[in-house]
Amino acid sequence: METIVQFGPGGRLAGLLSGAPGADGALTLVLPNAGLIPRAGPYRLHVELARRIGPQGNAVFRFDLPGVGEAPRLSDCSDEDAIRAALDCLEQRHGCTRFAVGGICSAADLGWRIAALDPRVQGVLLLDGFSYTGPWFWLARLKLALRRSPRQWPGMIRRRLTRARAPAEEMATESFRDWPTRSAARPQLREMLARKVRLLFVYTGGADDRFLHPRQFSWAFGEASRSDQVELRFWPACDHMFYRRSDRDRLVETVAQWLRPR
């Protein structure tokens, strides 16, 4: 069952609600756009999530943020405002009271920010979300370099020098992503865990400029990263958009298991 839901300023935003919301203990998964990809998600990933997760009792709401897909650009509604408006509408009209928010890339960043602000958010889905490099990242990068043939080293050095000469704002992932600093993220995570928020982090090979080793995770987030409310998956052979059918199937099943009421 899928229902069109209009919400936001003047009802100018819309999305699709799949499944039967309001089940006891169930989280409603809210999926904003992944970058500039419309609400169906990359390779219809959001649709597949909705149709897999709905039958187990978790509703899924996928929608376009202002200025993306079919949604108009709204000067009086930020991405955060749109998410909060969606949660308000789903709670008031459809009986949803507990939410998981997130998605791929910038949607993961947005899910984190909303979870830090809104107590109704009890789950955060972070697919190639923010990360911090640190010593384990550089050690993993060195090991990868040493595995290559010495004949490849001159080309690698040239590429590194070329990147080093480029303006920092053109190269850094965080220059076009809205990430908290590491010192800010740690207390935010602790506060979420105190509210019983559950978090699923999935890092793919598409994030190899920032994440190369699972031990980076505990270095970045500290003792809180070892909580049983935090789950980490590292899939280096998978690409950022989950292009392969097998990767999408694995992700859908992983998210379904994570959302299942406990």
Image (cartoon, helix red, strand yellow):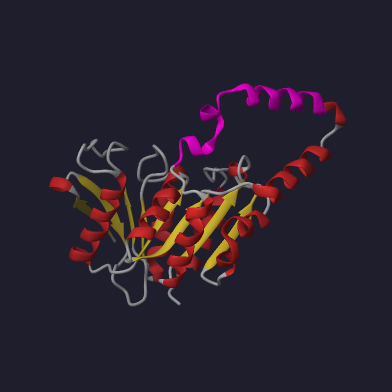
Look at 52% across and 48% down and name the residue there: 130
- Quadrant for the C terminus in the image: bottom left
The magenta stretch spans residue 153: yes
Please, is residue 161 above or below residue 231 in the view?
A: above
Location of residue 91 in the rendering, given as x and y in whole percent from the top left corner: 23, 65
Location of residue 64 in the rendering, given as x and y in whole percent from the top left corner: 31, 44
The magenta stretch spans residue 139: no
Location of residue 198 in the rendering, given as x and y in whole percent from the top left corner: 46, 67
Q: Is residue 141 left or right of residue 261?
A: right
Look at 73% across and 22% down and name the residue there: 158
Identity of the residue furthest to the front in this view: 183
Look at 32% across and 61% down and name the residue there: 118
Q: Is residue 76 left or right of residue 175?
A: left
Identity of the residue furthest to the right in this view: 150
Location of residue 3 in the rendering, given as x and y in whole percent from the top left corner: 24, 57
Figure label count: 0
Residue 223 sits in which quadrant? Answer: bottom right
Magenta residues span 152-177
Is residue 100 at least partly visible in the picture? yes
Q: Front-most of 202 and 227?
A: 227
- Quadrant for the N terminus in the image: bottom left
Q: Front-most of 67 and 138?
A: 138
Q: Front-most of 19 and 83?
A: 83
Q: Is residue 162 left or right of residue 117?
A: right
Is residue 64 at least partly visible in the picture? no
Q: Main secondary structure of the magenta part?
A: helix
Residue 156 sits in which quadrant? Answer: top right
Look at 58% across and 48% down and name the residue there: 132
